[in-house]
Image: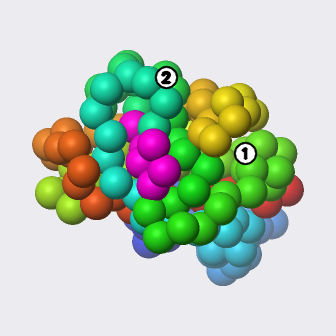
Amino acid sequence: MNLDQMLALLPDNNTGAIDAADLRAIVTDLFGGHSVAQVFGYLWATGTGTPAVGRVLVSPLWSAGSTTLRINETTDDGQNLIFTVLDSLSSNLILSGANGGVLRAKITGPSVDLGTSRDIPITVTGISGAAPINGEKMAVVVQAVLP
């Protein structure tokens, strides 16, 4: 939901102690100023095991019931991810495939270090489009909600 859609849900409060301009200022600040997102490039992996370098998958595969993001600590372009911040903040996750499939999830706990990869507990909040195919380019977006 974008900012205008959120604001449309608020009743007009021109007669109370808080007027509409105040509410707009509060919601605008909350919506735009307290999160940070990073995008990482990966390739989709099929299967259930530990993902290879540059690979990511969810388990069970691409479904509303997926409970785990399995991600290699090294992205497709060779970046090494650091999980300290991700593990300490409330975070959202978006997986977006080149074919248009999108999976949105809430990260529900700290990652489990498996050596070269991590298992991250998730709760899927939305899914649309086709499941990615093996080797498909994926954008992994992590949005950390700042305290």
From the viewer's perspective, tell me whether residue 137 is left or right of residue 115: left
Q: Is residue 2 above or below residue 66?
A: below
From the viewer's perspective, tell me whether residue 131 is left or right of residue 60: left
Q: Is residue 22 above or below residue 88?
A: below
Q: Secondary structure at mark 2?
A: loop
Residue 15 can be seen, yes or no:
no
- What's the residue at 23%, 54% (across, down)? 136
Tell me which corner region of the image, top left, top right, bottom left or bottom right, holds residue 4: bottom left
Residue 134 can be seen, yes or no:
yes
Residue type pointed to by label 1: Ser
- What's the residue at 60%, 39% (across, down)? 117
Q: Are marks 2 and 1 in contact (CB under 8 Å)?
A: no
From the image, tell me which residue sits under label 2.
Answer: 67
Q: Is residue 80 above or below residue 125?
A: below
- Inter-mark Cα distance, 2 to 1: 16 Å
Q: Quadrant of the C terminus?
A: bottom right
- Percent x, y of residue 93: 52, 49
Residue 90, which numbered label? 1
Q: Is residue 36 above or below residue 55?
A: below
- What's the residue at 28%, 33% (across, down)? 46
From the viewer's perspective, tell me whether residue 99 is left or right of residue 92: left
Tell me which corner region of the image, top left, top right, bottom left or bottom right, holds residue 131: top left
Residue type pointed to by label 2: Thr
- Percent x, y of residue 112: 71, 29
- Percent x, y of residue 24: 63, 74
Asked whether residue 120 is drawn in magenta, I would say no
Q: Residues within 10 Å of mark 1 (few under 14, many from 20)?
A: some
Q: What is the magenta range?
A: 52-57
Q: Nearer the viewer, mark 2 or mark 1?
A: 2
Q: Secondary structure at mark 1?
A: strand
N-terminal-most mark, 2 or 1: 2
Q: Nearer the viewer, residue 19 or 79?
A: 79
